[in-house]
């Protein structure tokens, strides 16, 4: 009888440990899921643009950064698309590049009220001459879903994530050629901020 009680106690302890380990793994998994931040993503994008550029970019010559636009409608941006453009401009400026401010009364850039700054391709060379601009940073964004699956110990964690995908390019203003590009993604919780 004593052996039976000991056996039942041992099984109960082992089951409790297994249950604790499973709960611990899920808690740890939740903590390890990546957190995304627009500033961090834009910083990484600028690092890529500068590092991967095929032509030398003169820090003394101006660069224009436009609002990021929806890949579904290239004449539509959002508050976050405009903010992403602002952050990209800030990050380039912090690295010593000359970034032309678009809100200072120029009339060569298409500014759609409530939408942001857009460069019309037919005006790109005209802008380059007028402002001695060597390059323009442009980009698109799209919202989608991904299923993230990660294994932590014996526990498999699956959850759908709403993802924002950014495609950002630096384009030479005289030839319209892409001299550098990057693609970034981040997890978001509110797709409506991006117009979705």
Image (cartoon, helix red, strand yellow):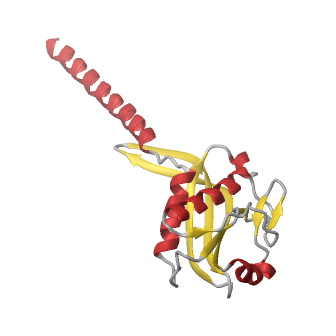
> Which quadrant of the rendered structure holds the N terminus?
top left
Q: Residue furthest bottom?
A: 175
Q: Nearer the viewer, residue 194 or 125?
A: 125
Drawn side of residue 182 relative to residue 108, left or right: left
Q: Residue at x 72, y 50 (%)?
A: 79
Q: Which quadrant of the figure has residue 110?
A: bottom right
- Coordinates of residue 136 in the picture (x, y in percent): 65, 74
Q: Is residue 181 above or below residue 23?
A: below
Residue at 53%, 60% (x, y): give it: 91
Furthest-left residue in this view: 2
The x and y percentages for residue 125 are 74, 84
Give percent across and percent down for residue 64. 66, 70
Percent position of residue 48, x then y: 49, 70
Vertical order, 51 against 156 (above or below): below
Q: Nearer the viewer, residue 118 or 186?
A: 118
Specify whether 17 is left or right of 46. Answer: left
Q: Nearer the viewer, residue 74 or 25?
A: 74
């Amino acid at each position: 009888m004593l052996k039976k009680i000991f056996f039942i106690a041992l099984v109960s302890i082992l089951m409790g440990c297994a249950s604790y380990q499973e709960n611990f793994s899920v808690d740890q998994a939740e903590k390890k899921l990546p957190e995304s931040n627009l500033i961090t993503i834009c910083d990484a994008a600028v690092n890529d643009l500068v590092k991967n550029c095929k032509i030398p970019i003169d820090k003394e010559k101006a660069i224009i950064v436009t609002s990021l636009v929806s890949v579904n409608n290239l004449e539509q941006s959002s508050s976050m698309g405009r903010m992403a453009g602002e952050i990209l401009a800030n990050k380039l400026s912090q690295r010593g590049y000359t970034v032309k401010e678009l809100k200072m009364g120029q009339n060569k850039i298409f500014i759609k009220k409530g939408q942001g700054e857009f460069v019309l391709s037919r005006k790109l060379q005209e802008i380059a001459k007028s402002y001695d601009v060597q390059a323009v940073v442009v980009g698109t964004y799209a919202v989608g879903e991904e299923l993230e699956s990660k294994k932590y110990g014996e526990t498999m964690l699956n959850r759908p994530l709403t993802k924002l995908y950014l495609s950002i390019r630096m384009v030479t203003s005289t030839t319209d050629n892409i001299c550098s590009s990057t693609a970034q993604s981040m997890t978001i919780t509110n797709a409506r901020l991006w117009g979705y």
